[in-house]
Structure formats: structure tokens, C-alpha cells
Image (cartoon, grey):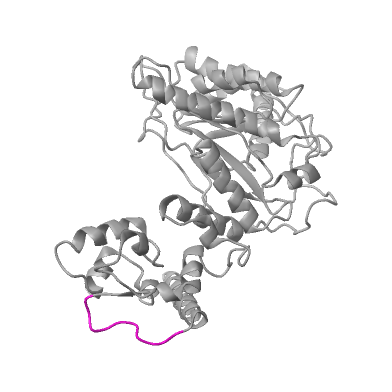
Amino acid sequence: MSDFNRIREKLNILADAAKYDVSCASSGSDRKNHSNGLGNASKMGICHTYTPDGRCVSLLKILLTNHCIFDCAYCVTRKSNDIKRAAFKIQEVVDLTINFYRRNYIEGLFLSSGIFKSADYTMERLIAVAKKLRNEENFNGYIHLKSIPGASDELMHEAGLYADRLSVNIEIPTENGLKLLAPDKNRKDFIQPMIKVRNDISRYKSEKKTIKSTPKFAPAGQSTQMIVGASGETDQQIMYTSNFFYKKFNLKRVYYSGYVPISYDERLPQIGSQVPILRESRLYQTDWLIRFYDFDIQEILNSDHPNLDPDIDPKLSWALRNLGQFPIDINKASKHMLLRVPGIGTRSVSKIIHARKFRRLGWEHLKKIGIALNRAKYFITCYSKSFESRDLTSEQVKSLILKATNSKFANQYNQQLSLFR
């Protein structure tokens, strides 16, 4: 077999194995081109391409190897899984990255790996790729290294000097779930690298204030990923874990990956070939509400409501459970309450607050601002004699909104079909 065919076969195997890791977004880095090098990971330097469910595909996304010493029930690279194995040499990954970048196929590298020999041995090889790209190829593009659970503090520090983002997947939301599906792994091995990265990022930011030449350390921060649906956790358990990691480790993102049944194991749920994309979406929406909409996690998920409503988004669900707080006057309500109105996003809230300084806002103004009136009208009043005055129950409001939403998409679908008639 020729070298070209050998590399291509490895690429097919190891790129396919990497598709289950969704934590590959590259926003947040400000690494700029210098010394006439290759690439640029400044804020506007990365071109993203997203799949319909939100996955970033703009990076060369591969595993260093799919050999692994562990036998995690949920993982495609588990040692007992009967799959074709492969491993890249360090220089092969470097060459692939540079060649793909020169052809404008990619804007950076996302590199993960199965664990072979030991955590430190694997982490050393990941770092070696990034080090060669930076020092030998003068590559200034984006690099995301998937940190290996159990890797030493020294290696985690070195990794942060070459990578824009580091991430350690905690994999299963609860410790009991991890013990069930990956009994050879210890939750502490996931936590320790995250602590080191958090502390070193904090130290870098502090030293940068007084010493401008301080070397960058993971400028795009760290993230993690959880598998959803493999171990029976409720949405409440998943999001409480997520909230803990955001606060404890100052994460940039938590990613939620629907469990994919890649092999049979009696410990795993049997869901056929369907991936719970809708559940992923609802978790991301909840994540967004907590991070940007001033919601507390306990308002959305608690013992009375341990799971998200699959029919409606979590913001609408909360509003329907709290109809007593509505309607609010759009011209007087606080930013805190405006953010809680279904159909009004953060940008629209900013526009409303600015616009109402100069005039009282009516329905036409709100329509021009861009709020979703088919949702918001049940929860607000404005400068108008016309408003939703019916005394509706939460179930009635939900039904009306779902009907309007379904009708809207149905009309769009029919319009698209008419183009081909």
C-alpha cells in the first residue's frame, strides 16, 4: 500500500471515530498571525460550518489513535469493540493539518485520542503535535486539544501553552453512572486536569496585567462534554451537573451529546438507531437561559419538574408555570422580566430598553424590533388598546402557540413545495 493510501485509510478511520465528540467550537481565541506564519485564530479568523444540530465542522477533527486501554460501554473505541484500529504518527498529523490548511479546507485542528499505554504517554503525544505545529511550522491557527483524564499537572500546563482550548470530557453526568458504564475510570481523574487548567488560566490573566510578555495559556478557555441518555439521568441531574462545572471551573461551554448505540451492552439503554437530538436541543436551550437570560437552574428544573418538556422550549415552559407573573407592561418592565418573556431574545430586550427612552412602544414598534409576537402577545401589554384579553389557562396558551408554530412551518413548507410544481 502506498503512503498516500495508508494515510487516507487512517484518516477515514480516525476522523469517523472522532465524530462522536461534539465539543469542538473555536470561539473565544485571539491568537494572531506573527512572523509571517500560517493561519490566524483571532476573533474573526475562524470560519465555522455547522451541521443542523449545531455541531461545528470547520476544524480538522481526528483522533490520534482509536486504540484504548479502557472498555467504557458507551464508547466506540472501547477495547472490546470489534472495529478496525489505526494510529497516526505525530508528523503525519502535523502534515495533514498544514496540507489541509493550505488548501483552505480547514481553519484549525481538533485533536483527541483513545488512551494507549497511559494517560501521560497519550497526552505527551498530543502536545508533541501542537508543539511541532507552533514551533516548527509556525502555525498560528486554532488548536483544540482534548485533554486526557489522569494526565499530570505538568503536562496540562504544557498543553495550555500551545493549545487555544483544552477540554476534558466528564462523559457521564453522574458518578454512579460512570461507575456503572466505565468502572475502570475514576471521576477524580477527570476533575484534576480541569482544576489545573482553571488555576493556570486564572494565573495567566493575573500575571498578564503586570507582565505583558506573559505566554498565552489556553486563551479560549476549557470546555467539557456529557453523554445524554446512556445512564438514565434526568434532565435535572444533567443540568445540575453542568451548572456545577460552569461555576467550579469557569468553563466556556458544556456540550451535550446524545447517546449513540454503537455496540450492544446490557448496561446500556436500547434505543435503536435514533439519537435524541430534540433532548440535546432542550438541554442547550436551558444552558443558554442560565448563562444569558438570568435564570436560576432551580426555576427551570426541580423535583416537581425533573425533565424538560419535549413539546415546547424551557423558557415557554417556565412562563406557563408562572402565568401569575404576567402580563408585564413592555414599557415599564425590568430587564430581568423582559428576558423571561417567550419570544423576546437578548438583542430584542436591549432594543426595547433603548427605544422606550424616546417613546412608548406599541405592537408595530415591537414587530419592527423583531420579537415573536405569536408567543409574546400572551405575556405582555404595550401602548395599545388591543391586547390578548382572554382569560386563558396555561394549557390553552400552550395549545394556541403550538398551533401557530405548526401552521407557520407548514406554510413555509408549502411555499417551498410550490417552487417545484
Q: Is residue 364 above or below residue 50?
A: below
Residue name at image x 57 percent, y 26 percent: 196
Given residues 54 and 350, the one toward you in this image is 350
Q: How many marks?
A: 0
- Provide residue 260's location: percent of width, then percent of height: 70, 50
- Provide residue 286's location: percent of width, then percent of height: 51, 56
Q: Is residue 115 above or below residue 234?
A: above
On the question of residue 155 being in view, the answer is yes
Quadrant showing the C terminus: bottom left
Q: Which corner quadrant of the image does residue 30 belong to?
A: top left
Please, which residue is most extreme toward the bottom here? 390
Q: Is residue 87 above or below residue 349?
A: above
On the question of residue 411 being in view, the answer is no
Q: Which corner quadrant of the image does residue 305 belong to?
A: bottom right
Instruction: Give the left or right position of residue 99, taking residue 90 as reference.
Output: left
Quadrant showing the N terminus: top right
Is residue 390 one of those drawn in magenta?
Answer: yes
- Provide residue 165's location: percent of width, then percent of height: 50, 30
Instruction: Give the left or right position of residue 327, taking residue 270 as reference.
Output: left
Please, which residue is most extreme toward the left here? 358
Residue name at image x 34 percent, y 72 percent: 373
Please, which residue is most extreme toward the top here? 136
Given residues 298 and 406, the one toward you in this image is 298
Q: Main secondary structure of the magenta part?
A: loop
Instruction: Give the left or right position of residue 343, taking residue 358 as reference.
Output: right
- Provide residue 148's location: percent of width, then percent of height: 66, 28
Is residue 219 one of those drawn in magenta?
Answer: no
Residue name at image x 40 percent, y 16 percent: 214
**Residue range corresponding to the magenta coloring:** 383-392
